[in-house]
Image: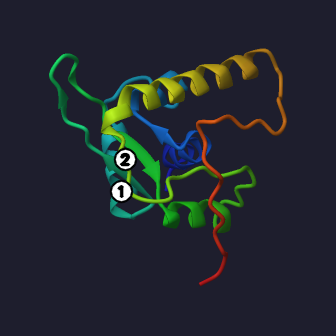
Amino acid sequence: MNRLQTEILCTLARFKYCTVGHFMELGLIKDKKHIYSYLKDLRQRKLIARKVFGVHLARGRLEDVYFLLIKGERFLLEKLGYEEQIHRPKRNVHFINDYFHRMACVSFQVHFYKWLIAQKKDLGLYENYYFQKPVQVKLGN
């Protein structure tokens, strides 16, 4: 696993859902040239998954949404020693009715996170309504 794939996993753990646009906004990538092959590899390893939302009549093609799977969470905890709170969906992702709202929430979180870093600030334990109660994973088998 390369550095970018590790950063993708950590980013999904922090923000729960991300699009390629979010990865670009966070500075993980400068262009979309190679990101899809890295995402495909992570999906084939069953560390992450994606939800394809297709085309919206008024807005055109919607960006695919990527999220962490339980195997990805275990990988972060056991192999990388990830210590921050991990956010991932508890079940299948079905939010076509509020796609734009959820993506706007993630975009806000991304911009807020970037602002905190630029200001050299730390909110400590910060939760908002967007994240559900975190899922606990048992280490081991």
Above or below, comparing residue 76 to residue 54 in the picture: below
Q: Is residue 84 visible?
A: yes
Most distant residue in the front direction: 97
Above or below, comparing residue 30 to residue 128 in the picture: above
Query: Could you tell me which residue is drawn at 66 percent across and 60 percent down?
Result: 80
Give the number of the disc on residue 116.
none
From the top left corner, tell me how far across and down residue 134 is, in percent: 65, 54
Left or right, residue 122 beside residue 22: right
Q: Nearer the viewer, residue 80 or 48?
A: 48
Label 2 Cα neighbours within 10 Å, binned few <14 / some 14-19 / many ≥20: many
Question: The C terminus lies in which quarter of the figure?
Answer: bottom right
Query: Could you tell me which residue is drawn at 31 percent across and 41 percent down?
Result: 36
Q: Secondary structure at mark 1?
A: helix
From the top left corner, tell me how far across and down residue 73 is, in percent: 57, 61
Query: Could you tell me which residue is drawn at 50 percent across and 67 percent down?
Result: 71
Q: Decide: marks 1, 2 in contact (CB < 8 A)?
A: yes
From the top left corner, tell me how far across and down residue 122 is, in percent: 83, 28
Q: CA distance from mark 1 to mark 2?
A: 6 Å
Left or right, residue 46 beside residue 85: left
Most distant residue in the bottom direction: 141
Residue with the mark numbered 2 = 39
Q: Nearer the viewer, residue 12 or 51?
A: 51
Looking at the rendering, which quadrant does residue 128 occupy?
top right
Q: Is residue 27 visible?
A: no
Q: Which amino acid type is marked by label 1?
A: Arg
Give the number of the disc on residue 43.
1
Q: Which amino acid type is marked by label 2?
A: Leu
